[in-house]
Amino acid sequence: MKRIYMDNGATSFPKAPNVAEAVYKYMTENGCNVNRSSYENAGEAEDILLDTRYLLCHLFDFDKPSNVVFTSGITESLNCVIKGLLKKGDHCIVSGFEHNAVMRPLNSIGVEWSVAEISKNGHFENIESLFRENTRLVVMTHSSNVFGNVLPLEEVGEICKKKNIPFVIDTAQTAGHINVSFKNLNCDVLCFAGHKGLLAPQGIGGMIMTDEMAKKIPPIIEGGTGSVSHTIETPFFMPDKFEAGTMNIPAIYGLNAALKYIIDTKVENIEKTENILRERFLKGISNIKGLHIVDCENTKHTPVVSLVFDNIDMAEVSYILEKDFLIETRCGLHCAPIAHKTMGTYPQGTVRFSFGYFTTNDEIDAVITALNKIII
Ligand SMILES: Cc1ncc(COP(=O)(O)O)c(C=O)c1O
């Protein structure tokens, strides 16, 4: 029996072709730090770093490579932006689908928040009424990591622009799955993860921001940047302001290879393939009694499906799927308790099946067969 990986929402596997090779090549043939030394190999690593900023601009429809900042991942990016822009007593607006990477920083600062709800027709109809005198930020996930519903953030961005409130987007679950345009989303900061839909290694992510945000947000980490080394002051210019310390260069080589693959393949082709897989799965399980699809209607979807089961615990389903069928899923709350409260699956959670571009029809069919057997 072959392992069937259904946990791409947590991290993608396999990674894009050439990713492992690019990391290996860097580790064995180059290995140099960036922005510090002037020999040729260091220059090559710097070229890859800069090229990766350009590729991210291309992917996210953004114009300024110097405002593309690398971090250890999207959790760090969200912490930097949220803690940089908010203080105790401020008010913030979120969606009902946020990950704890957003909710925990808000909670620890002591910020008040309001949840914008999506109506049955898939829009944030009442969001304008949530803005208060002390609203300082709107932060939203682009798609739920639990239910796969894509949120209509373009309309939120327009309202934020009108009200002059910064809008921050968490693209952990959409980047690489659907087209994500910084411009169309009308956002001020776009945070991304490298290791999910971008098909790159763990340990690399980032944030892309307007000049205004680049000025306004303070760095949370300060130290050596290889620039203006005569002073103990942190550089104010981008991207150095946010990139102190040695970066995860092996992962950047991997991300570079992954982005080239995604751009060559075209995100719309990835989306098309993943939609076909999701439809095949939904059709295949539609007649199985004792399980229910938890879903938001009238939205676009990423390839994530959450199920709940009658008369059997979610953890047990996940356990049996692995033990008897080598199918790897995730059960529980998926670090997003507020999403479960929104959809009525708190506290038991769901069993999540998250596919990727490399998932095959045979794998989907094997999961459908396994679910039929478990329910019987
Ligand atoms: C919507 C969303 N935001 C943020 C994160 C945090 O990602 P990471 O753990 O890679 O920092 C995740 C991870 O599952 C996520 O799904």
Image (cartoon, rainbow, N blue to C red):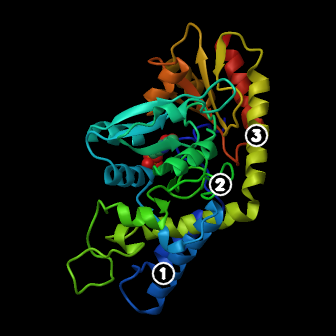
On whether ligand 1 comes within 8 Å of the CB at mark 3, the answer is no
Local packing at callout 1 (Cα closer than 10 Å; few below 14, some 14-19, many 20+) is: some
Q: CA distance from mark 2 to mark 1?
A: 30 Å
On whether ligand 1 comes within 8 Å of the CB at mark 1, the answer is no
Q: Is residue 120 left or right of residue 67?
A: right
Local packing at callout 2 (Cα closer than 10 Å; few below 14, some 14-19, many 20+) is: some
Q: How many marks?
A: 3
Q: Which of the two marks, 3 or 2, is nearer to us in this view?
A: 2
Q: Nearer the viewer, residue 137 or 310?
A: 137
Provide the secondary structure element on which disc 3 rests. Answer: helix
Q: Position of residue 49 (x, y in %)?
A: 50, 75
Q: Position of residue 151 (x, y in %)?
A: 61, 38
Q: Nearer the viewer, residue 25 or 86?
A: 86
Task: Say if 365 sits above or below 157 in the image.
Answer: above
Q: Which residue is mark 2?
A: 184
Q: Which residue is mark 1?
A: 46
| Image marks 3 and 2: residues in contact by CB distance under 8 Å | no
Identify which residue is drawn at 26% across, 84% down.
229
Q: Earlier in the sequence, mark 1 or mark 3?
A: 1
Quick one: quadrant of the C terminus?
A: top right
* Amino acid carrying mark 1 in the image: Glu
Provide the secondary structure element on which disc 1 rests. Answer: helix
Q: Position of residue 255 (x, y in %)?
A: 55, 64
* Residue 178 in sight from this viewpoint: yes
Q: CA distance from mark 3 to mark 2?
A: 22 Å
| Image marks 2 and 1: residues in contact by CB distance under 8 Å | no
Identify which residue is drawn at 42% across, 92% down.
39
Q: Which residue is mark 3?
A: 275
